[in-house]
Each structure stands twice: as structure tokens, then as C-alpha cells.
């Protein structure tokens, strides 16, 4: 089980690789604000990939989490002390409180997650996990990393590191 922020969810849906989350991690949890941003926000701008996320929610492998009182309080405190968006904050809080990993791409969100001792990974790391778990072969990994670079900005260093690690563990 893993928590996913909006940007990685949108990126994987745009790449038509959303199902990798289910294959690798099983169930996926999204914060209420993330669901609103991805589904309602996606519909508002006519994003066709929103239907993939809706289908995953209907199928039950993407689940909207309800924040506890403690989690809501922690999220409010964090919102007041950082420049993060509400979805990022809720995602980090869910991961921290429930001892789950969170998928985040925003640099500041990753820094806050680290400071809060919430385990995190980026979308490029998800693709590496997909390779390591056998959900992608090496050629598919290279293609997926290229696709991801067309959807979000990826540092050339990140691309090189992902492919270097995959080559080192090549099956």
C-alpha cells in the first residue's frame, strides 16, 4: 500500500501507466484534496486521463483516505508553516501517520517529507520499482522514463541514475 500525490497520479495516467501502481504496490491511498485535484480538476480542464483514475477508484484499488482528527490537525499546522499545497500536505501527513511510503515529485514536498521522516519516492523511482518487480523490462523502462520526461521535467541526473541502477540490476 502506498500514498500518491496528485502530480505522480496525473503523470502516470497521462502515460497510460497508472496500472503500474496496482502491480507494484497493490492498494493506493489518495488524500481527499488529491482526489479533488485530480478528478474534479481534471474534469474541469477536460483531461481525458481522468477516466483512468475514476476507473481505478471504482475498481477499489485507488482509495480516498479520510483524515483522522490528529491528521487534520497536523495538516493544518504544516499548511501554516510551509508553502506546500494542501494535497501535498495531506499526502505527507497520511504517509507519516500511517507509516506508508508517499510518491511525491515536488522538490520542496520531498524535503518536507524527509524532515518529517516520511518515506518517499518520485515517479521516476516508481518506474525503477516497476522494473525491479518485473512489471517492466529494461526496454520498457527506458521508454517509460522518456515518456515521463515528456510529461514532467526530469533532471538528466535523475534519468541517468535510474537507468544506471537498472543496468546494475539487469535481469
Image (cartoon, helix red, strand yellow):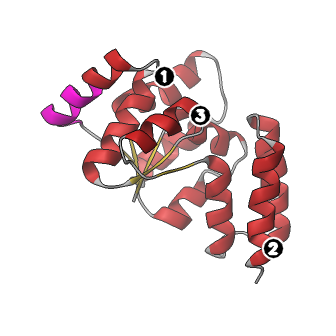
Near mark 2 (Cα within 10 A), the count class, few <14, some 14-19 or many ≥20, is few
Q: Name the residue tied to disc 3.
A: 107
Residue 72 left/right relative to 90? left
Looking at the image, can residue 31 be seen?
no
- The residue closer to the viewer here, 71 or 161, is 161
Cα distance, mark 1 to mark 2?
40 Å
Magenta-drawn segment: 67-75
Percent across and percent down for residue 79 are 35, 20
The correct choice, above or below, for 89 with respect to 157 in the image is: above
Residue extending farthest to the bottom is 171
Q: Name the residue tied to disc 1.
A: 40
Near mark 3 (Cα within 10 A), the count class, few <14, some 14-19 or many ≥20, is few
Residue drawn at (38%, 39%) of the image: 92
Kindly state the secondary structure of the residue where label 3 is placed.
Answer: helix
Residue extending farthest to the front is 115
Residue drawn at (50%, 37%) of the image: 111
The correct choice, above or below, for 65 with respect to 137 in the image is: above
Cα distance, mark 1 to mark 3?
25 Å
The earlier-in-sequence mark between 1 and 2 is 1
Cα distance, mark 2 to mark 3?
26 Å
Question: Quarter-wise, where is residue 148 in the image?
Answer: top right
**Is residue 17 magenta-colored?**
no
- The residue closer to the viewer here, 150 or 121, is 121
Q: Name the residue tied to disc 2.
A: 167
Residue drawn at (32%, 25%) of the image: 78
Residue 25 left/right relative to 65? right
The earlier-in-sequence mark between 2 and 3 is 3
Mark carried by residue 59? none
Of badges 1 and 2, the one in the foreground is 2
Amino acid at each position: 500500500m502506498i500514498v500518491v500525490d496528485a502530480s505522480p497520479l496525473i503523470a502516470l495516467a497521462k502515460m497510460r501507466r497508472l496500472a503500474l501502481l496496482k502491480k507494484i504496490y497493490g492498494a493506493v491511498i489518495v488524500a481527499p484534496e488529491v482526489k479533488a485535484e485530480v478528478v474534479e480538476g481534471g474534469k474541469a480542464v477536460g483531461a481525458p486521463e481522468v477516466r483512468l483514475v475514476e476507473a481505478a477508484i471504482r475498481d477499489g484499488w485507488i482509495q480516498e483516505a479520510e483524515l483522522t482528527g490528529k491528521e487534520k490537525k497536523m495538516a493544518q499546522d504544516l499548511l501554516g508553516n510551509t508553502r506546500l499545497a494542501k494535497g501535498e500536505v495531506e499526502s505527507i501527513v497520511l504517509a507519516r501517520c500511517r507509516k506508508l511510503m508517499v510518491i511525491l515529485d515536488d522538490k520542496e514536498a520531498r524535503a518536507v517529507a524527509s524532515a518529517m521522516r516520511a518515506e518517499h519516492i518520485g515517479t521516476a523511482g516508481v518506474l525503477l520499482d516497476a522494473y525491479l518487480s518485473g512489471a517492466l523490462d529494461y526496454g520498457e523502462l527506458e521508454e517509460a522514463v522518456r515518456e515521463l520526461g515528456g510529461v514532467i521535467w526530469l533532471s538528466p541526473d535523475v534519468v541517468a541514475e535510474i537507468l544506471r541502477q537498472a543496468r546494475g540490476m539487469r535481469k
